[in-house]
Amino acid sequence: MPLVTSNELLLEAQREGYAIGAFNANNMECVKAVIEAAEEERAPVILQVSQGAIKYAGLQMATEMVKTVAEEASVPVVLHLDHGTSFLQNVQCLHAGFTSLMYDGSAEPLGKNMEVSAKICEIAHAVGLPVEAELGKIPKIEDYVTAEEADDLRARPEPEQVRILREKAGPNVEELMADPSQAQRFVEGTGIDSLAAAVGSIHGMWADSWPLRRDRIEELRKATNLPLVCHGSSGVIRTRADAEEKGIELKPNECTLEEAVQIGICKVNVATAVSMAFLKGAWDAWQERLNEKDLRKILLPGLQSAKELVRGYMRLFSCSGRVSGTSAVAASEVKHAE
Ligand code: G3H
Ligand code: ZN
């Protein structure tokens, strides 16, 4: 079916109290993993093209991969620009057929962020496209730990990882969070359609163990009444049960990903976890058959592993079962078994 705009999905999700998963289109296998999960789960989905994907595959290749799968799909698919860097890049993506744009002006002073976001909204809205913009700054894990420190941390039990990260990153993550008192002015002054608000998450974490700030999500929802977007979701602890099982204690003003969806997060960006699931599936398959010559036989288990992870997230977001009908895309094991 033709691509749909993010507004069409996010406003419905906001009304009904669920969230749409937004997964990165990094290679053909991951795109297929996401679309197959969406088809089987009957879930609307957002495929987004990141700055890394544009560098890796080129804008045209990344765009065409998503357009091709969306055309064959029987569930609604959005082609979204992730962390757009400028007005010009947004124009290029509008021209390339994206159905959702984003400007990340978090490194700019607030005035400049608002000015560019408003300019993008003006041209995007003229052709019916929605725009997401970032308020506050969602940091990345590399801002706090070196590669060696990360290796050391990853070897420790998860509660200890969280305790150490709370010390190293906690105060700065808090400082960078979106300010609810600026949010209304930001939204009214720009005309944006969804808000990528810094609510305590960190991009690029290797495990789902880190909490979000419940109070900040609630205040931002009240201040803006817009669909809120959670970035850096790979590292966010999924459920209370997970937290208990892992021995991770949440403070009273913190919440899990599942709870964040219940209180106003309508789009959840997951990238690192999909990449890691893909790598693990492919790695395990290769370790089992080191003499394999056919790369598809190694990549396919990677695809399957990424697909199961995406399926789990769709269920967590209560997004599964939102689309009627049956799958139009054959599962990869059937298609590629020669
Ligand atoms: O914009 C993309 C996301 O925020 C992904 O973050 O890699 O931590 O899941 P993540
Ligand atoms: Zn992000």
Image: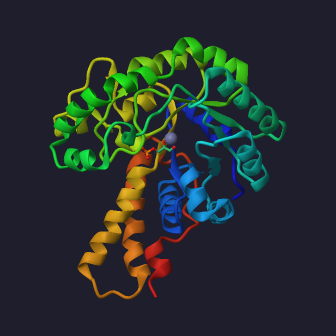
Residue at the image position 46 percent from the left and 88 percent from the top: 338
- Could you tell me residue 193's position as x and y percent? 67, 30
Q: Quadrant of residue 174?
A: top left
Nearest the eye: 330 or 222:
222
Is 125 left, or right, of 130 in this rendering?
Answer: right
Nearest the eye: 186 or 142:
142
Residue 316 seen in the current view: no
- Could you tell me residue 233's position as x and y percent? 42, 40
Quadrant position of the N terminus in the picture:
bottom right
Q: Is residue 85 above or below residue 298?
A: above
Residue at the image position 48 percent from the left and 80 percent from the top: 336
Residue at the image position 49 percent from the left and 67 percent from the top: 29
Residue at the image position 42 percent from the left and 20 percent from the top: 175
Q: Is residue 133 above or below residue 145?
A: above
Residue 41 seen in the current view: yes
Nearest the eye: 320 or 260:
260
Q: Quadrant of residue 237?
A: top left
Residue located farthest toward the top when viewing the structure as drawn: 181
